[in-house]
Image (tube, grey):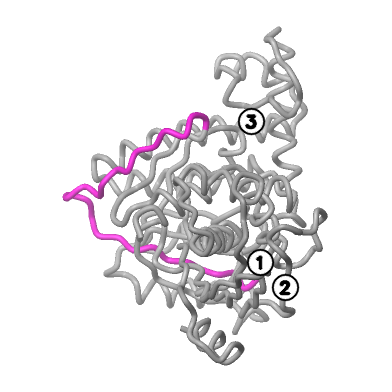
Amino acid sequence: MKCVEKFESIYNREPAGIAFCPYRVCPLGAHSDHQLGKITGLAIDKGIHIAYHPKQNGVVELVSLQFPKRAQWHVSAVPEVKENDWADYLRGATLMLAQKHPLKVGLSGVIEGTLPIGGLSSSAAVILAFLSALCKVNNLELTGHELIMTALAAENKYVGVSCGKLDQSCEVYSQKDHLLYLDTKDDSYELIPTNENMKPYKIAIFFSGIERSLAGSKFNMRVDECKSAAYSLMAHAGMEYGKYNDAYLRDVPYEVYLQYKDRLPENFAKRAEHWFSEYFRVQQGAEAWRKGDLEAYGKLSFESGHSSIYNYETGSPELKALYEIMTRTDGIYGGRFSGAGFKGCCMALIDPAWEESITRQVTEQYLKEFPLLEGKYSVHICSSANGILHL
C-alpha cells in the first residue's frame, strides 16, 4: 500500500496499524436522508486507508496522498473555526469525539484513497477511517450508531455540509452480498441478502473526471428548498409546526403533499416531488431485491437518476451525459449519479458478462462528447463489501 510506504519513508518506522473504511454507492434513496427518508445502499471494495502510529503527546499529524500540505493539531486544542482545507473533516471529527470521550493520545498518519474523489462519500469514509484509528489509540470502543453520529456531526456542525446519515450508515452497517435498507428517521435497518435466484452483478464506477466539494456546491441550497417545501405544506394544511430547522418532508403526509403541492413555488414543488417519488422507489426497490429481481431494481435506479436531473435538478453536463449513455448501454441493469450529483461520478449495476463491452462503449461515447477529459475520466469495476461494523 502506498500509504504504508509513505509512512515508512516519513517516520522511518512501520505503522502500528492500518484503518480502512469502504466507499459506498446508493442506487436508490438519493437526496432523501436529510429529510429523514429511506435509503438502500452497498459498500464497495474500494475505500480509504490510513497507516498510523500513536503519538503520546496528543498531537495529530496527517499527510494525504491526494492533497498537498501536512495538517497538525492537538486532540485537546482543535481550532474552533475550520481552516478550509482537506483536513477540516478530521479536525471536526476530533472535536466531536472529544466532546463525548476524553482524548489523550494523538497519532501520525498517512491517508490514501483508492479511487478518485467525488461521488462515493469519500468525506464520510475518511472521517470514519480516522475515527477508527483515533479510537484505537485511545482505547475507545464506539458502537456503529456512535460512529455514524460522530462522523455526521463533523460534517454538519464543523464543515458546514447539511448532509444526512446515508453515507456514514452505508459505510458502517453494510455487509458483503447484502443490500442495506435503512430508515433514517429511526435508524432501523435491514440487511437484505442477495437472492439465490438473482442474476450476477458487479458495480461499475464511471468517474467523470470532474471532482467536487459538497460545501462549495448547491447541496445546502437543495436541503433548504426541501425544508421550505415541508414548512410551506405544513402551513397550508394547518398542521402544527415548530422551528424551520425541525421541518422535514418525512413529517408531511403524502395526501397533504398532493392536496397543496400546486401552491408551492415551482422549485420547492420539484424538490418535494423527487423526495416523495424516491421514498416510494426505495420501498419498491427493497422488495425487488428481496425477490431477486435485479432488472426491476435497476429500472428503479434509472428512474431515480431521471428524477434527480429533472426534479431535484442536480447533475453537471458531464454526469448527465454519463447517465444518458448508461441508459442506452446493453448489460447495465440500472444506475444514477453517485453522491450529490454536481460533479464526481455515476454508478451502475452491471452484468459481469458485459463488463468489457460496457467499459468500451461508455468510454468511447463519453470521451467523444468530452475529449478534454481523456486521462482524467476513468472506469472502475467493484464488488459489494463489508462496512466497518463487519470488517
User: For the magenta stretch, what is the residue range?
Assistant: 185-211
Q: Compared to 232, does 369 lie above or below?
A: below
Q: Is 199 on the left-hand or right-hand side of 86?
A: left
Magenta includes 163?
A: no
Q: Compared to 228, does 134 lie above or below?
A: below
Element type where label 2 sits in the image:
strand
Q: Which residue is mark 2?
A: 71
For the view shown, which residue lies furthest in the left direction? 196
Element type where label 3 sits in the image:
helix
| Residue 177 place in picture, x, y as percent | 28, 55
Question: Residue at the spot x=43%, y=38% of the render?
Answer: 182
Question: Residue at the spot x=62%, y=48% of the render?
Answer: 309
Element type where label 1 sits in the image:
loop
Q: Are marks 2 and 1 in contact (CB under 8 Å)?
A: no
Q: Which residue is mark 3?
A: 272
| Residue type beneath disc 1 | Gly
**Cα–Cα span, label 2 and label 1:** 14 Å
Q: Is 14 on the left-hand or right-hand side of 314?
A: left
| Residue in the foreground of this view, choosing between 242 and 226 | 242
**Which of marks 1 and 2 precedes in the sequence?**
1
Which mark is nearer the camera, 3 or 2?
A: 2
